[in-house]
Image: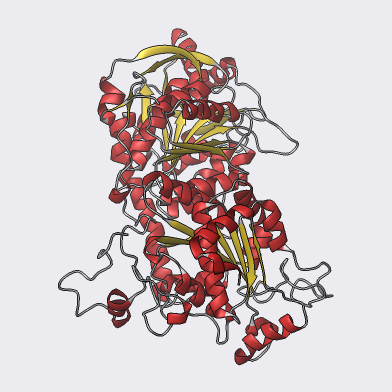
Amino acid sequence: MSEGLFRISPGFEEVMPAEYKELVADGPCGREVGVSDLGAFKELIEEHPLCAGCSAALALRLILASLPKPEDTVIVGSTGCSSLAFTQVAVHNIHSLFGNQNAVAAGLKRALRLRFPDKVKDVVVIAGDGATVDIGLDMVMQSWFRREHITTIMLDNEVYANTGGQESGMSLRGMVLHMAPLGKRFPKVALPEIAREAGCAYVAAISPAQPKRLGRVVRRAILVAREVGPTYVQIFCPCPTNFKFRPDESLQKIKQRQKEGAFQVREYVSPEAQAFLAELEGADHEE
Amino acid sequence: MAIQRVVTPEHLFFEAEREKQFITGSEAVREAIRRANVDLAISYPITPQSESMHLVGDIYAEGYLKEYFRGESEFAVMAEVAGASMGGVRVFTATGGPGTLRAFEMFPTWAGARLPIVCTFLTRGVNSPLTIQPDTIEMAFMLDTGMLMFHAENAQDLYDMILKAFVIAEQPDVHLPVGVFADGFFVTHTREQVAVAPADLKLPPYDPYAAPVPVMDMESAPVRQMRDPFVMKSNFISYAAHASWQQEILAAQERARKYVHRYLEGLVDVEHPEAAVLVVTSGTMVSQSREAVAVARQQGLDIGLVKVKSLRPFPREEIKTLARQARTIIVPEYNRVGWLCREVKAVVEDTTKVIGGPRVFGGMTMPPEVVLAQIRRCCA
């Protein structure tokens, strides 16, 4: 988007909602802001209808604060909790159907490359675990096989939360959930490892319990997708509503799982992406 | 890289001198796309469609399209062309039969998102046990997706309708997807003389900023749509928003009528409208019926032929008016359910005039003699 396009037409200053005016005056477009600057700029997301303590909502907030170029970013979502928040996000976003997000994103990215060959247009998929690992897995993986230049972010709450708490491929083995009345019979799908093998140039598993690292991971994923190839970020964000813990316990739950070794933060970087990031970030990127 | 000159749709369709080529229906798809200024095409194989998209791939390699690839399934392909269309480029794909059903969830979504996608459906049976043979039953399922639907009689129609579909689909007051249907094998795999415009001419490019919905390219300022999405609300405002959106799609179909008139030169072609008995049909069944009608007229029977070219919008007034003076309407079809007969019955004032059939399905051909026998019974 060209500079200054995000503005209020003359005569409409009085009637525009306050949050929109703030976004125009103090938004993140065209500025170098990130997770560390939260509170010092107007965020792309305004309120949201997700549950109290929703760590996916927190993850979404952190992702949106970490977009390297929000003024030229299009988000493709899918059906699920996260889709409910996108109507309040001030970047173009697409909800098509349940599970087809990576196919839509692949077509979109190719179209934007044709129309804007000299301009960066980032296409970022943000979808839940059901959309990514169950109903949409073929299209997710095929987009990786084809080396589409898109970033795929999974908000992994380990359950179909929006439909009331059914087992997903990302639920842990043994979890008793709707549609798994005797407990889940197979382990959590190792999608980061699958992504690495399927052609992703950069893969990370992270959580909103480490906001700065999450921000850096998202930024890296989007930058690598621009230049090198597909990238995947899996964000562990447990659901207080369906797993019945207090809204203020979400981050504790993540840390506890991490302590038990059942959730590991990890990054897989292809040699090509490594070289690209080294050049971009300088010698200290491996800290 | 192919060098082509942009001309007006009117010039390409009606004024440019045409050359006759002896080609198959699949090759007619290629020749249409060669002149359609398509940015991106996505393919997936299914009999009897596959060859048409191989040929589109060949002209991509020659430089007539900017982008082309094979997708992973029909559902994915229809999602990929949707994403590309939302990104503001002109797209094309093709499928048929089971592929149509595999992709089905996307078609109302295309219409709902107001995407001017053109898709060719080269029809075939969808029943189990497995068949790859001609049958038009998938068209019954497509009638209420919100898409515009044209039915080609032959390769000439297929060539013309595909090109014209882009122009109709992209009108700002229409902006809907168009399905161009042709009967698999009968059209795709047979060869006929097709008159085509010079290959160095092409349609004007798609202008995404003339669309009635925003292009998803972040070149216009995004708006926050609402504080709470309608999907979460059970209240009048959310129902009214969804209801008016659906009504608007139907209204856009109605607004397409004038463009179908202009470019397809009418929603129907009629031969002998004054006849006491009319055969009303579409697709290759028109060719079979035309043979039967010619023989019947030689024998002195008072019989006419109505070729339905556009199914959505449906030629409601045309058929209603024709039916008023006719004693009997015969509707032969290449499917088991008789969807065209239902459509005709829904618009005529006296449904007892409408005789459904003869019908063949599962890959059978319709000998003109069978239509003729029906004509004789109705003229008796």
Residue occupying the point 34% across, 52% down = B251
Q: How is the image coloured?
A: secondary structure
Q: Position of residue B173 (x, y in %)?
A: 29, 48
Residue toward you, B24 or A24: A24
Residue toward you, A203 or B72: A203
Q: Is A34 drawn above or below residue B29 in the view shown?
A: below
Q: Is B214 drawn above or below residue B377 in the view shown?
A: below
Q: Position of residue A130 (x, y in %)?
A: 65, 65
Q: How many marks?
A: 0
Position of B269 with respect to A13 (left or right) is right
Residue toward you, B309 or A60: A60
Position of B271 with respect to A243 (left or right) is left
Q: Report if residue B380 is visible in the image.
A: no
Q: Position of residue B69 (x, y in %)?
A: 54, 38
Residue occupying the point 39% across, 24% down = B2
Residue occupying the point 69% across, 83% down = A243
Q: Is A279 drawn above or below residue A63 in the view shown?
A: above
